[in-house]
Image (spheres, grey):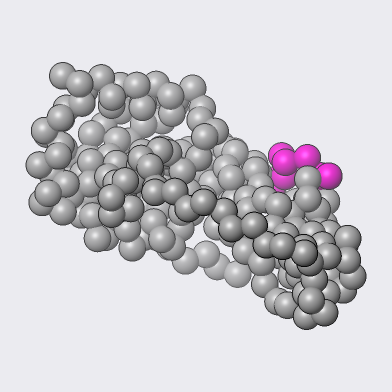
Amino acid sequence: MTKEKHEIKAEIRTVLGRRVKHLRKAGLVPATIYGHKFESLSIQFNGLELQKIYDKVGESGLIELLVGSDKYNILFRNPQYSPVESEIVHIDCYKVNLKEKISAFIPIELIGEAPAVKDGNTLVSITDEIEVEALPTELPEKIEIDISILTEVDQMITVEDIKLGDKVTILTPIDQAIVKVEEPRAEEVIEEVTEPVEVPAMNQKTEEEKAAAEAEKAKEEE
């Protein structure tokens, strides 16, 4: 199956430091392009266009980024959100080499219906992403897990059950559970709902990501 091509435009960003708040008021989102042996570049996106494409591809979809006459193959990384409106206020763009394998966390999407749940049991989702390694063009944007095979209590689906072909290597341990069927609890515990905070979507960062984040923070403190 041919992957959908994703493309987005951005502009060079000259506004740095704390003044980026003026960009956000104008509907723009500051960003940084970084990568191996690549000097980081400050850019800005149209906020609506960025949110639209990010909702489609997340942090695993390959994107062609157009900045003037230049083109970059990138993956989105480490989006930061407004604690009030839950909108993206900053994002990193990781420039990739299409001929070099990279690792990425791929979201899991559960499909189908579990017969065991129809019988009154509870479906427990244990993890919603797994780490894989592949060429950027071979990275799946999501992994679909069919839960219709779950017919009894205590049945589970693990990473070992996921088949992605020879071009993608799964890095998450094979015994990691994805989803499990449990007996219904006597009492449901209502979890406290907290307000969203401005943190990266993923805690796993490479050294390049850490360096880019520290450089951006230093600019904003100027």
Residue 171 lies within the magenta run:
yes
Toward the viewer: 207 or 82? 82
Toward the viewer: 191 or 151? 191
Give the residue drawn at x 39%, y 49%. Answer: 195
Residue 41 lies within the magenta run:
no
In which quadrant will I find the N terminus?
Answer: bottom right
Q: Position of residue 79 (x, y in %)?
A: 38, 43
Specify whether 208 is left or right of 108. left
Q: Position of residue 184 (x, y in %)?
A: 79, 67
Q: Position of residue 93 (x, y in %)?
A: 37, 40
The image quadrant that residue 180 belongs to is: bottom right
Q: Position of residue 161 (x, y in %)?
A: 82, 57
| Count of number-bearing discs | 0
Q: Main secondary structure of the magenta part?
A: loop
Give the residue drawn at x 36%, y 31%. Answer: 34
Tell me if residue 75 can be seen. no
Range shown magenta: 168-175
Give the residue drawn at x 33%, y 53%. Answer: 86
In which quadrant will I find the C terminus?
Answer: top left
Specify whether 60 is left or right of 38. right
Specify whether 175 is left or right of 169. right
Toward the viewer: 24 or 82? 82
Rendered view: 56 above or below 82 = below
Rendered view: 95 above or below 6 = above
Specify whether 44 is left or right of 100. left
Tell me if residue 151 can be seen. yes
Question: Which residue appears farthest toward the front when viewing the image?
Answer: 187
